[in-house]
Image (spheres, coloured by chain):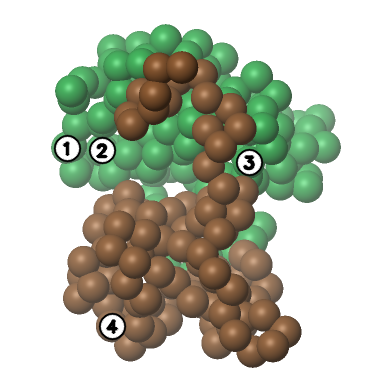
Amino acid sequence: MAMYIRAKRSKTTYFLQCDPTETILDIKQKLQALIDQPVNDQRLILVETGEVLEDSKTLADQKVENDAVVALTLRKDDNEFEDVNIVKPNDFYQPHEADGGSNC
Amino acid sequence: MVCVLPGLGREKGKEGEERVVASAGKMRKEDTLKLISAEGFEFVVDRKAAMVSQTIRNMLTSPGSFSETEHGEVTFPEISTTILEKICQYFYWSLQYASGKETEFHIEPELTLELMMAANYLHT
């Protein structure tokens, strides 16, 4: 296995095995099999940079590396894409988070 | 800090390595498993990856099938989201490691204890 990426939306994370030479469209097709949403209704955003990933380009082209997190957003009824929505566990549960936390 | 926990050593079952053939090709829903954390967060992983855990492997392969495995969902009410995600990352790291890509697995020190308890539970 060459690499994997994590596609996140709301409280769900999809671990996707992939290869750096695969295109974003390939990734969306994998997601389509899992979430029953056509590729045209999916948008992937590299969380680190906020960059919207283009279907025709490969993962390597767009610097999507092993273990990268991409946000999955879906097309809404009004034809627009929804905003990035990733819920983090420490939004309401914070036993161990050390980075950036305040000591209250 | 980068470290490799001895307690998290790769499982070496009898059928060990040949199972670790992971492809980057097509993905099918039936081949995935949804792991659900204490807070109700969901992690969708390949069954092949989840079977790095001996506990999950036993669930998936035992004859009297668990209802969880038929629905493709397993809930871990005792494993927090942070830890479960780390475990899923470990599954994939382990597959990569087994296929010859020797990297280190990063574990935040503050996660170590809880992660080892979960790893013990999952036989990972």
Q: Residues within 10 Å of mark 3 (few under 14, many from 20)?
A: many
- Chain that the image shows in brown: A
Residue tagged 2: B97
Mark 3 and mark 1, same subunit? yes
Rendered image: mark on residue B102: 1
- Residue receiving disc 3: B41
Distance from the alpha carbon under mark 3 to that under mark 2: 27 Å
- Amino acid type shown at disc 2: Tyr
Image quarter of residue A100? top left
Q: CA distance from mark 2 to mark 1?
A: 5 Å
A6 versus A84 height, above or below:
above
Mark 3 touching mark 1, by CB under 8 A?
no
Pick the front one: A63 or A92: A92
How packed mark 2 is, by other alpha carbons closer than 10 Å (few <14, some 14-19, many 20 or more), is some
Residue visible at 40% across and 39% down in the picture? B89
Disc sitting over residue A57 in the figure: 4
Tag 3: amino acid = Phe
Q: CA distance from mark 1 to mark 4?
A: 28 Å
- The green chain is B
Residue drawn 60% across the image and 85% down it: A80
